[in-house]
Image (cartoon, rainbow, N blue to C red):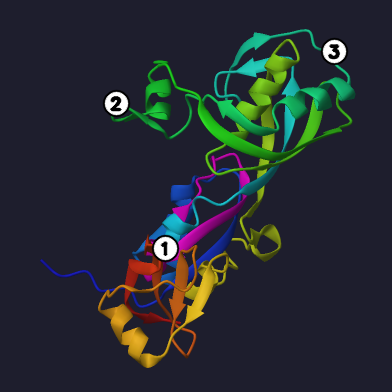
Amino acid sequence: MARRRPPSRHGLVIVDKPAGMTSHDVVGAVRKRFDERRVGHAGTLDPDATGVLLVGVGYVTRLMRFLSGMDKTYTCEVVLGVETNTLDDSGVTVATYDMGHVALEQVREAAVRLTGNILQVPPMVSALKVDGRRLHELAREGIEVERQPRPVHVEQFLVEPTNESNVFHISVEVSSGTYVRSLASDLGRLLGGGAHLRRLRRHSIGPFVEAEAHSLDEVLLLSPVEALRGMTSVTVDDDVAAMIRNGRQLDAPDASGPWAMVDASGALLAVYELAEPGRAKPAVVLAEAVA
């Protein structure tokens, strides 16, 4: 059997995902554009959602786990008075409520109650696994299972009016793992009825913002070091670089970590993390320095 050729292009692509594509579809399009098989994404976006999606190419796929846990910002519209089985406008209506009396200030007060450290029940349409099955797979079969609330953090939850009755524009900054559709549903519940979201757009993931996101026809391949721009970078000499390539532990650069270890030319060698006080161990060592 022929061996698959090793990747020859490495970097990060910041995609402005269009509506109507899954995150997996985007990965396929990036594979074709850069003629690389080794491609993966961080931070799944629903098919109907748009905005920032991070895609790693080549050896950068090994770094995507460091990008998945960053805070994210979103905007969407919340439609009060209508619940759907998917908590967004792609689903079918399962309940309606008379919420024409709800005022802007009431919505804002409810949003305050959903700000800070909260417990959130993952929706059935999520990719979380229960007993080895993804929730959205079970949901498609009409099966609903009990989900345990999970702690998440909502740093900001802003509400503005729109020109439509019972429709409000929201902007949120949330921790990784927060479901905005669940925030919309919980908002409706706190207001004495129900709600769903529409027009969800992700504006940022950590330091990666929509101003640098491009359509699939125009995406750029950023350097591997750029993929770790939110991480402390440590430049090492040739002797230490040789130790890194051999996976050796090092003195920790400081008390925190992880660290992006780069050589004198600025090429990425590895990511190190704290092993014990004062010592750092390799989390990912790249097969070669990638610039």
Q: Position of residue 290 (x, y in %)?
A: 41, 80
The residue at the point 54 percent across, 41 percent down is 47
Of labels 2 and 3, the one closer to you: 2
- Point out the tag, 2 or 1, that comes first from the N-terminus: 1
* Label 1 secondary element: helix
Q: What residue sits right under mark 1 in the picture?
A: 63
Q: As shown in the figure, which amino acid type bears the numbered disc 3?
A: Gly
* Label 2 secondary element: loop
Q: Nearer the viewer, residue 245 or 13?
A: 245
Kindly check if marks 2 and 3 are in contact, taking CB atoms under 8 A apart as contact. Answer: no
What label does residue 100 carry, if any? 3
User: Is 6 situated left or right of 57 in this image?
Assistant: left
Residues at marks 3 and 1, CA–CA distance in whole angstroms: 48 Å
Extent of the magenta region? 41-63
- Image quarter of the C terminus: bottom left
Q: What residue sits right under mark 2 in the picture?
A: 131
Vertical placement of residue 235 versus 122, above or below: below
The residue at the point 68 percent across, 58 percent down is 210
- Is 46 inside the magenta-drawn segment? yes
